[in-house]
Image (cartoon, helix red, strand yellow):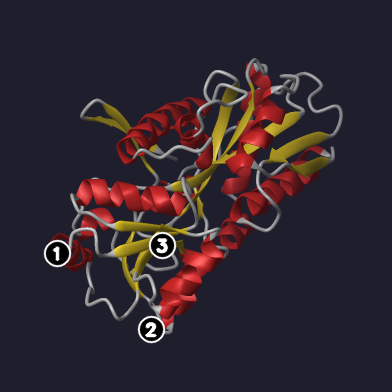
Amino acid sequence: MIRISTCAGTVVLLLACSLAPAQQPAPAKSAPAEGYPAKPIRIVAPFPPGGGLDLMARVIAQWLTDAWGRQVVVDNRPGAGGSIGAAIAAKAAPDGYTLLIVSSAHTVNATLYRKLPYDTLKDFDPVLLVTAVPHLLVVHPSLPASTVKQLVAIAKSRPGEVAYASGGLGSSTHLAGELFRNMAKIKLLHVPYKGTGPSLVDVLSGQVPVTFGTVPSVIQQVKAGKLRALGLTGAKRARLVPDVPTIAEAGVPGYEAATWHGVLVPAGTPAAIVAKLNGEIMRMLNDAEIRARVTRDGLEPLGSTPEQFDAYLRAEVRKWAQVIRTAGIRVE
């Protein structure tokens, strides 16, 4: 379950482990869409195989195949930050046989790119929010900061000198850093790399002292003492690192830079089909084996109604538009 509240005129969605679907009864079966599904279904995944989004696409595909007895396949269409796959799905027939699994990049792209071949909100109907992917704010041990407040103090004493590495212009790690910089009222030097892997290499070597990495990508280095974890970007603490506070807890109130995955369908898909998809994927998220599997892979199972996911998407578009425009980020 997710909780939506209004704060200073902005819809805020709390992606909370404590509010995850396992703590509520599995939803009752929705009224079946007559004859659906009658043929194979494809899930367009707008990123390459191997990442968290692809993992969730395959988990959902297998679950739906087993539940409905119809083949559900994953169609990876990477490129342009996810917008190539989104454009393919936007043009598909709104009949429930093409799904689109998206990440937070979907809402970022609405502002990051000058022109997209689809409308981020109007060309899709939301099904549900599936998982969150928490990131950690980590520093190299050579930087004398053991807390978020100490990092902020160092950055304020050395404006523009403390650098943070990201996986590239407009990446989730870049935007997490920009939001942190804005909300903490500090000046940080952004050092973009061609991917999170290369950026992490230089942070581990101490060439760049700060970065934001997904929990699975940095947890072993934190445990080994090669990196120091200061805070979590999500709204709640993560199961894999329960002792690490959120950045909001640790000194930047209101900070949240969640990376997430959700399912959309082309606009105009019958409501009965959306309801059936929502109900079945919610049942998947309540399955103990599925929850254990995705948690081991560093994802936080969530779940929502279509209406809640719609409100969240709109809030995310507004939030990241402000960050992107303030930072002057643009990808042509």
Q: Amino acid at mark 2?
A: Gly
From this view, report whether residue 73 is shown above or below residue 165: above
Question: Residue 136: horizontal and vertical position, in percent?
Answer: 39, 63
Q: Is the residue marked by circle 2 packed among few (<14), some (14-19), or many (20+) residues within 10 Å?
A: few
Farthest-out residue, bottom: 224
Spatial CA distance of label 2 from label 1 is: 22 Å
Q: Is the residue marked by circle 3 packed among few (<14), some (14-19), or many (20+) residues within 10 Å?
A: many
Q: Residue at x 39, y 74 (%)?
A: 207
Residue 30 visible, this orientation: no
- Quarter of the figure with residue 262: top right
Residue 296 placement, left or right of 177:
right
Q: Amino acid at mark 1?
A: Ala
Q: Where is the N terminus found, in terms of image quarters? A: top left
Residue at the spot of label 3: 165
From this view, report whether residue 145 is shown above or below residue 165: below
Farthest-out residue, right: 39
Secondary structure at badge 1 equals: helix
Residue 200 visible, this orientation: yes
Spatial CA distance of label 3 from label 1 is: 19 Å
Q: Earlier in the sequence, mark 3 or mark 2?
A: 3
From this view, report whether residue 300 is shown above or below residue 144: above
Residue 63 placement, left or right of 244:
right
Residue at the spot of label 1: 153
Spatial CA distance of label 3 from label 2 is: 19 Å
Secondary structure at badge 2 equals: loop
Residue at the spot of label 2: 225
Residue 328 placement, left or right of 80:
left
Q: Residue at x 30, y 37 (%)?
A: 326
Q: Earlier in the sequence, mark 2 or mark 1?
A: 1
Q: Earlier in the sequence, mark 3 or mark 1?
A: 1
